Image (spheres, coloured by chain):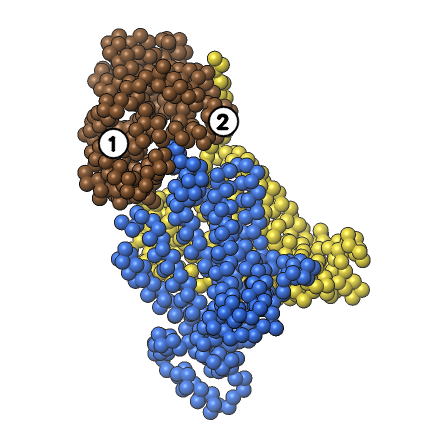
Chain colours: A blue, B brown, C yellow
């Protein structure tokens, strides 16, 4: 088992290096003067220009620059934002919890609804229930989620007035951000109504972000379930006189979940991509919106650093999912 | 009163090309302590009839019969939950591919103990003790250790022993064995067959063996039923069947052994007997 | 006892067989019909549209759709903030979306299949390097990578297409590579090699035709994903730029009107949904028709 983990880690290192090369090249590929791009200043005298070139190490050979960049990365220095003047890593750590909270809620919703839907569709294969569930899943998976979010806002926030339009919590609440997770912080703060407010602000963004993963998970669960239901061991389980619930919920599901776990893991990338759009629509202060804003504001250090950080997060999550998969599948464990 | 009685069993499947009769009017009786062999080619409906009796067919199958009785209970009229009380407890079945028939995600101990829990209501200690006892009974070495193994860690023969142990766990009155040795090595085949026969004698169970191997029939059965394309062609006690088969089809089956081949090719039954001739020669 | 007659006719082969299985999936046929309608509308846009998509008409700013109060029948789906007819813009938008889908899929498939063939056939270090590079691309969320690429190349439709093609590349490489690796050890390939077939011939004429089925299905899904991604980039302002009537770009412009002019927001998104849904329905039908395991008895 440990060998399995080390094997995966070994693959991670060249990938990490490759990702860092891409992030490093990013600014140098942009049109325009790198000094101007990296410092953000529009006008400067030639002396200033030379000064910054030396400061940023841009006068040294490219491979030395890359090496410096790599060393900085390993020390946690991802550059500084032109806009906030703070280290990119600091801004990232401040905004990341918002994205994590949203993504976690979305994936929980997607699994909690998607897996049962898939199981039900598989068990009732061919009936109208199956076709309705899978038809809905197909629509969800074909949906432009930025439009879906706008529609939900028009209806639930505009027309019905049930949910707010943007932000994480009502402006009337103010308390220290202990964990960065609004749900937890609002509970800790003890202020009446804070938690409820945090929940109402979370509902629509979660639904929007969860839509595609839910659809994909439902479809995958159904197809995994259908395969498993045809296997010999399911027939054995039935021949033991076990109830259908036990046959499907214990014997079949356990096996069907194995490929589904891989799917859920792959959804992380989808979630982060979706977070970019969802956070933009709902002005949710997470890293997705941060990246989009930075591209527009030409805060290129942030884009470069953010790219690196997000890729690192995805690689780590993929590693965790791989390890989890190794645990769940007894054939790999032993 | 016989232990297991079937009269005029018909099983029809819904397929894309219309309804298909896998079993067409088969009848049989098995008494307690008796060994019945059902023999026939692939597609003769031997497995389907037994699966139908156990209620293990998919919803696309329509099962009808004049009589389908076990131990005096009418199986056709039973509700699903009542049937589940009998299946796995008083009637048990083992299948052809032992490794595939066990759930790869659970230990073999889990898979046998769950039957003990659900049908007999034993507590944890009792379950474990009984499981070890059963593993010992079927000849699995180091039973206590084996309980925590997964199916893929065991050989085909051992998995089949586990399946037999599971089937016997509640002391069933009838055991159905669907091609139990077909997927196993020749040397293991004999061991498993001997085990089955010994257990059958010791427990006084009714045993139905489904096979396409006449050698297995000769070694194990008291009575034999020959099936072809869903219909019964002949039924007789084993000695009579081998010494003086009454139907042409049975004679053809017995002669279709490689030992009896003359010339370059093995003759196939279809070459000298058409379906109509086979059905016409059926001995009831 | 009644004997059931089972009709046996010779089963259809080739294109007829494919159509037989495809047409049994009602959704797939509906998808095909809808897609064809959209395609025809897009091709004949200049003839079909009631108005020009770019002419602004100050008299009819933010007109509601024909069936609502205040609407006019000449502007069936209403007008936008500068008086352009939404229906006409949508139909022209179809041209962009379908074109994007086509270009992206062509680029991704050709490059992906080539790279995948090389990786799967030659194995060894070539394979490892190629797969590492693909892993690197996959380490980034697709939209983010596309966004950054467009930032580098500059916003616009062409750059958006290049970015999306690059992001799709690993999927086709993986697919082709897996198919090639499983086919390459099969007897017919070894037989060809023994008979003296050269590497290129083996790769393209022997192995590739047998890997086509999953490729076709993936290409269909990539087509719809490309349309969604291009619209997303347009929505974020990094894809087609205004006044281009691309559906995503139209949505970006419409955002400020969600309170007072719901039609400016609803219809472009609906157009995206219907098109993508039609293509995905066809993709599902294709998968069922081409997958030999699902052939019914």
Q: How far separated are the C-alphas under marks 2 and 1?
A: 33 Å
Count of marks overlaid on the render: 2
The residue to which callout 2 is attached is B14
Numbered disc 1: secondary structure: loop
Q: Earlier in the sequence, mark 2 or mark 1?
A: 2
Q: Quadrant of residue B196?
A: top left
Q: Residue at x 57, y 42 (%)?
A: A132
Is residue C260 visible in the rendered image? The answer is yes
In the rendered image, the vertical position of residue B231 relative to residue C253, given as above or below: above
Which numbered disc covers residue A22? none
Front one among C23 and A195: A195
Q: Residue at x 42, y 60 (%)?
A: C138
Front one among A223 and C80: A223
In the rendered image, the vertical position of residue C208 relative to residue B39, given as above or below: below
Q: Residue at x 30, y 21 (%)?
A: B206
Front one among C204 and B199: B199
Looking at the picture, how far across and down is residue A207, in whole percent?
56, 57
The residue to which callout 1 is attached is B184
């Amino acid at each position: 088992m440990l060998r399995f983990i080390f094997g995966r880690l070994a693959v991670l290192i060249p990938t990490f290096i490759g990702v860092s090369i891409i992030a490093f090249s990013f600014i140098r590929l942009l049109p325009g003067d790198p000094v101007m791009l990296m410092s953000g200043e529009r006008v400067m005298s030639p002396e200033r220009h030379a000064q910054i070139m030396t400061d940023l190490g841009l006068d040294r050979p490219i491979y030395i620059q890359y090496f410096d960049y790599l060393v900085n990365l390993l020390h946690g220095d991802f550059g500084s934002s032109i806009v906030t003047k703070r280290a990119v890593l600091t801004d990232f750590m401040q905004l990341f919890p918002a994205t994590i909270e949203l993504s976690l809620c979305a994936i929980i919703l997607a699994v909690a609804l998607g897996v049962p839907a898939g199981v039900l569709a598989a068990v009732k294969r061919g009936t109208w229930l199956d076709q309705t569930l899978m038809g809905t899943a197909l629509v969800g998976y074909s949906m432009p989620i930025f439009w879906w979010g706008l529609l939900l806002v028009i209806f639930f926030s505009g027309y019905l007035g049930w949910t707010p339009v943007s932000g994480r919590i009502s402006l009337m609440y103010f308390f220290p951000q202990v964990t960065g997770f609004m749900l937890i912080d609002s509970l800790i703060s003890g202020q009446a109504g804070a938690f409820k407010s945090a929940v109402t602000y979370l509902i629509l963004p979660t639904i929007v972000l969860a839509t595609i993963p839910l659809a994909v998970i439902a479809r995958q669960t159904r197809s995994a379930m259908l395969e498993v239901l045809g296997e010999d061991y399911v027939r054995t389980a039935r021949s033991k006189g076990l109830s259908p619930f036990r046959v499907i919920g214990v014997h079949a599901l356990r096996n069907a979940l194995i490929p589904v776990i891989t799917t859920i893991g792959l959804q992380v990338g989808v979630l982060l991509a979706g977070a970019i759009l969802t956070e933009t629509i709902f002005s949710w202060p997470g890293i997705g919106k941060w990246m989009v804003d930075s591209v527009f504001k030409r805060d290129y250090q942030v884009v470069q650093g953010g790219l690196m950080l997000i890729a690192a997060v995805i690689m780590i999550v993929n590693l965790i999912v791989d390890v989890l998969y190794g645990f769940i599948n007894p054939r790999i464990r032993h | 009163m016989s232990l297991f009685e079937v009269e005029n069993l018909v099983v029809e499947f819904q397929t894309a090309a219309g309804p298909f009769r896998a079993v067409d009017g088969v009848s049989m009786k098995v008494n307690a302590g008796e060994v019945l062999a059902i023999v026939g080619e692939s597609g003769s409906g031997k497995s389907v009839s037994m699966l139908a009796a156990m209620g293990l067919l998919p919803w696309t199958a329509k099962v009808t019969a004049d009589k389908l009785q076990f131990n005096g209970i009418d199986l056709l009229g039973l509700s699903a939950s009542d049937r589940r009380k009998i299946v796995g407890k008083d009637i048990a079945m083992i299948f052809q591919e032992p490794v595939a028939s066990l759930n790869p995600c659970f230990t073999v101990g889990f898979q046998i103990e769950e039957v003990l829990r659900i049908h007999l209501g034993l507590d944890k200690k009792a379950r474990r003790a009984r499981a070890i006892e059963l593993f010992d009974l079927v000849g699995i070495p180091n039973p206590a250790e084996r309980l925590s193994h997964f199916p893929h860690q065991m050989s085909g023969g051992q998995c089949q022993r586990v399946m037999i142990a599971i089937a016997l766990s509640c002391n069933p009155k009838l055991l159905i064995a669907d091609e139990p040795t077909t997927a196993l090595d020749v040397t293991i085949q004999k061991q498993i067959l001997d085990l089955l026969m010994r257990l059958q004698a010791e427990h006084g169970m009714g045993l139905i063996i489904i096979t396409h191997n006449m050698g297995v029939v000769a070694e194990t059965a008291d009575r034999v039923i020959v099936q072809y394309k869903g219909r019964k062609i002949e039924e007789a006690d084993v000695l009579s069947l081998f010494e003086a088969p009454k139907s042409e089809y049975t004679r053809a089956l017995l002669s279709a052994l490689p030992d009896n081949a003359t010339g370059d090719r093995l003759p196939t039954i279809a070459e000298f007997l058409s379906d109509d001739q086979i059905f016409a020669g059926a001995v009831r | 006892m009644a004997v059931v007659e089972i009709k046996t006719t010779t089963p259809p082969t080739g294109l007829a067989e494919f159509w037989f299985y495809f047409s049994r999936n009602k959704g797939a046929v509906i998808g095909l019909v809808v897609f064809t309608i959209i395609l025809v509308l897009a091709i004949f846009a200049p003839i079909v549209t009631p108005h020009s998509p770019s002419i602004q008409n100050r008299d009819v700013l933010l007109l509601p759709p024909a069936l609502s109060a205040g609407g006019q029948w000449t502007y069936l789906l209403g007008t936008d903030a500068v008086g352009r007819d939404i229906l006409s813009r949508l139909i022209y938008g179809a041209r962009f979306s379908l074109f994007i889908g086509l270009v992206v899929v062509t680029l991704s498939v050709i490059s992906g299949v080539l790279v995948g063939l090389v990786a799967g056939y030659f194995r060894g270090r070539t394979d490892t390097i190629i797969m590492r590079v693909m892993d690197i691309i996959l380490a980034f969320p697709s939209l983010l990578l596309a966004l950054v690429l467009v930032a580098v190349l500059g916003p616009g439709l062409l750059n958006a297409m290049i970015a999306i093609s690059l992001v799709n590349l690993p999927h086709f490489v993986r697919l082709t590579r897996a198919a090639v690796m499983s086919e390459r050890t099969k007897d017919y390939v070894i037989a060809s090699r023994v008979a003296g077939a050269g590497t290129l011939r083996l790769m393209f004429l022997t192995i590739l035709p047998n890997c086509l089925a999953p490729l076709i299905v993936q290409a269909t899904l990539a087509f719809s994903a490309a349309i969604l991604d291009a619209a997303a980039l347009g929505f974020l302002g990094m894809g087609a730029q205004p006044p281009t009537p691309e559906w995503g770009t139209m949505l970006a412009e419409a955002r400020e009107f969600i309170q007072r002019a719901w039609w400016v927001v609803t219809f472009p998104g609906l157009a995206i949904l219907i098109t993508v849904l039609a293509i995905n329905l066809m993709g599902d039908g294709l998968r069922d028709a081409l997958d030999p395991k699902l052939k019914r008895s």
